[in-house]
Amino acid sequence: MKETTQTMLSIPEKGRPWADLKAELEAAKKDDFKWREGRMALYFYYLNEEVTRVQQEAYCAYWTENAMGQRAFPSMRKLEGEVLQMGLSLHHAPDGAAATFTSGGSESIFLALKTARDWARETKGIERPNIVIPRTGHPTFDRAAQHLGIRVIRVPTTRNDFRADPDEMAKRIDGDTIMLLGSAPNYPFGVFDPVEAIAALAQARGLWMHVDACVGGFLAPFVRELGQEIPPFDFAVPGVTSISADLHKYGYAPKGASMMMLRDAALQRFQTFEFRDWERGAYASSTAQGTRAGGAVAAAWAVMNFLGRDGYVHWARVIMDTVDRLCAGIGAIPGLTVLEPHELCIFVYRSVDPALDIGAVAEAMGARGWFVGRQAEPPGIHMHLNPVHAETADMYLADLRDAVEEVRATRATAGEPAGRTY
Ligand SMILES: Cc1ncc(COP(=O)(O)O)c(C=O)c1O
């Protein structure tokens, strides 16, 4: 075993008063970025204090109920059922569809892959499965595939618009392929894959088609209501088998909330884990969890009912107006350009001037108190907007103009982003 010179912390001999601990927790955050202040464009989703209070109070109302134990907590079954119904109808699910409340996008995607794998094994005898996905697909597909013994074949997107290329995907399908993917939208560039074309390909080849709408699932339908063209991406598209959509992103639920939806509830038998071979009797779970946080379900239910369609449309407008305002401002700074296309809440900008190092701009923005998401390919700055950024957009643009001037004046360079860029 590795020697350690540090004394490992033990649970304290005696407890301490909550007032002290509370103060310590608050003080512990002092160096963390203040997401409420809109100085970061990743990792969080924030509307306002009113919605935060709804999240917190609803969560606390069910803070320790176990959503797994629905025999004991029938109210959990009702609340969860209503959340799932609202999500399914938003995604044009047909009669006979089913959905599962999960802890996040990664669990939803894990369950989609697991269900597809077991379906393909039983119905087609595929023992060494692979999935064919665009290169822009979220890394969590590879993580899930690694756990599940599935090979991932990532296919380059089209050069001009960062969209999945169905012709190239078709070339990579073989006898062991079980699933195709389209993102709605993808995370690196914020563009929608051509879901209709990929789903048609999946239907023609008898494959499972998953749509990753973790980002767009609870935003794109409302942006469409604003009149913006959003390509079809949900169960309205024939051939879409499953969809992941995150409540804890633009559903504005607190963290620990997503949905995995299936066009056909009959497929759920490939998803559900059942076990009897122990003394305690039958155990069954349709998620990757056992005990599940009841608070996450109650809070998602409360926020959906609090905002209503009107609320979601209102905040979608705020986000899209802010995207327009920021993109216009960034595009007006000599040497910077916003990558096109981008279709929702995500965009990337980069330098088109060899004398202006975008990494150095990112660092100069960091020095001005902004938490910056660095894009690796092409080198750039990745923005993932929340409603709160409407309040900070002008400040961001002023600091960006200043940062660019500083980088030009000092000829600073920063090179590749160090370590994790996400
Ligand atoms: C497109 C997409 N899919 C999946 C995920 C994974 O979701 P989570 O972080 O909730 O597990 C993300 C997270 O950002 C995402 O952007």
Image (cartoon, grey):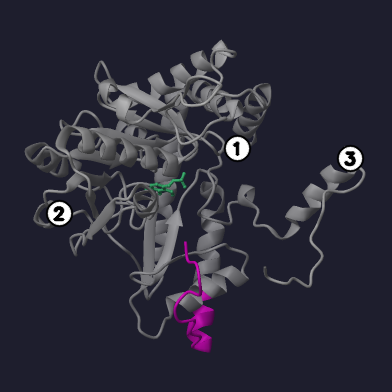
Q: Specify whether residue 243 is painted magenta.
A: no
Residue position for label 3:
19
- The response on whether ligand 1 sits within 8 Å of label 2 is no
Q: Position of residue 292 (x, y in %)?
A: 56, 30
Q: Residue at x 52, y 23 (%)?
A: 301
Q: Using the rendered view, name the quadrant where residue 117 is placed.
A: top left
**Under 8 Å from ligand 1: the CB of mark 3?**
no
Report the side of 291 relative to 230 (left or right): right
Check the image and report above or below for 86 versus 172.
above
Name the residue that disc number 1 marks: 48
User: Which of the two discs, 1 and 3, labels the residue nearer the N terminus?
Assistant: 3
Q: Residues within 10 Å of mark 3 (few under 14, many from 20)?
A: few
The residue depicted at 50 percent of the width and 67 percent of the height is 420
- Judging by the rendered image, the residue that carries numbered circle 2 is 169
> Magenta span: helix, strand or loop, mainly?
loop
Q: Choose between 292 and 56: the one closer to the eye.
A: 292
In the foreground, 268 or 217 = 268
Q: Is residue 106 above or below residue 5?
A: above
| Label ID, residue 232 | none
Is residue 411 inside the magenta stretch?
yes
Q: Determine the residue positioned at 89% across, 40% down.
A: 19
Q: Is residue 159 visible?
A: yes
Can I make out residue 229 in this image?
A: no
Q: Which residues are magenta?
A: 403-422
State the residue in front, 61 or 189. 61
The residue shown at (78%, 48%) is 25
